[in-house]
Amino acid sequence: MNFLSKAALSTGALGAAGTGSYFLIKKDRFSNKERVVLDLTGNSHDSIWTALINEYKTSHENERIKGVTTATPELQKIKEYCNSTGDSVDNGFLDIYTKWCTRATLKHHFDTSGTKRWIEDDSGWSASLSSYQKEDNLDEKLKLSKDTNTKFSKTDITKEAIVGFCNTASQSLFVDISNDDYKKSDKWCTK
């Protein structure tokens, strides 16, 4: 094999390895349940898309999608970007794709916000239970549900009920800080 053939083969192998590692990184980044790729065709993530449009209006220039303005960002253009770059092998698109086409779970959002962490130990759950039981005028929106029609009172709440709510909420997607699930998670699932 001549020198040029060896060089071409080496370059091709390195390129394939780089592309392969990119896909592994991308797959790993979105399959670890920290972030979820948003639905581009249905309406299951409408509230998140609305929040993203509002966030886009105040985004930094280096975070923006080419061709989408901050004055009146169009959801359809953002979804088209997500659709067209979802399989891209260009690392330059990965951060922008992650920001506008995926959303963090509530647990991941809190764990990476720098201010609070998701409770993962028994003492944290006990403190959350104690806090719930001490609340005298707890807002109805912050009460945890016993079933579809009944909320837990401060006397009948259990640590297991709080852990159960938080386990479910941990995989819910972060919408924004005004969202009821966010507020409940902030109050009962973090320290």
Image: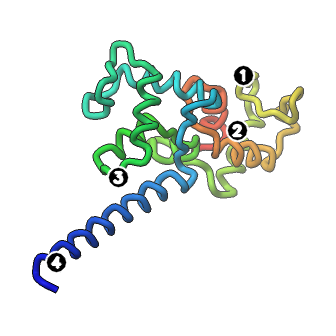
Name the outermost residue toward the left: 3
Identify the residue position indicated by label 1 in the image.
Answer: 139
User: Residue 131 has which mark?
Assistant: 2
Residue on which the image places disc 3: 89
- In the picture, which quadrant includes the N terminus? bottom left
Q: How crowded is mark 1: few (under 14 residues within 10 Å), some or many (20 or more)?
A: few
> Can residue 125 be spotted in the picture?
yes
Amino acid under label 1? Asp
Q: Which residue is drawn at 63% across and 55% down?
A: 120
Mark 1 and mark 3 residues within 8 Å of each other at the beta carbon: no
| Tag 2 secondary structure | helix
Q: Which is in the foreground here, disc 4 or disc 3?
A: 4
Distance of label 2 from label 3 (alpha carbons): 48 Å
Q: Which amino acid does label 3 sit on?
A: Val
Front tag of 2 and 3: 3
Neighbours of disc 4 within 10 Å: few (<14), some (14-19), many (20+)? few
Residue farthest toward the bottom in the current orientation of the protein: 1
Residue type at numbered disc 4: Ser
Seen from the viewer's position, the closer of residues 18 and 147 is: 18
Name the quadrant containing residue 38: top right
Most foreground residue, 137 or 58: 58
- In the picture shown, does residue 51 fall above or below 82? above
64 to the left or right of 158: left
- Residue 5 is labelled as 4
Q: Which residue is drawn at 30% across and 24% down?
A: 67
**Residue 41: image location, x then y, percent:** 58, 31
Marks 1/2: CA distance?
14 Å
Amino acid under disc 2: Ser
Q: Residues within 10 Å of mark 3 (few under 14, many from 20)?
A: some
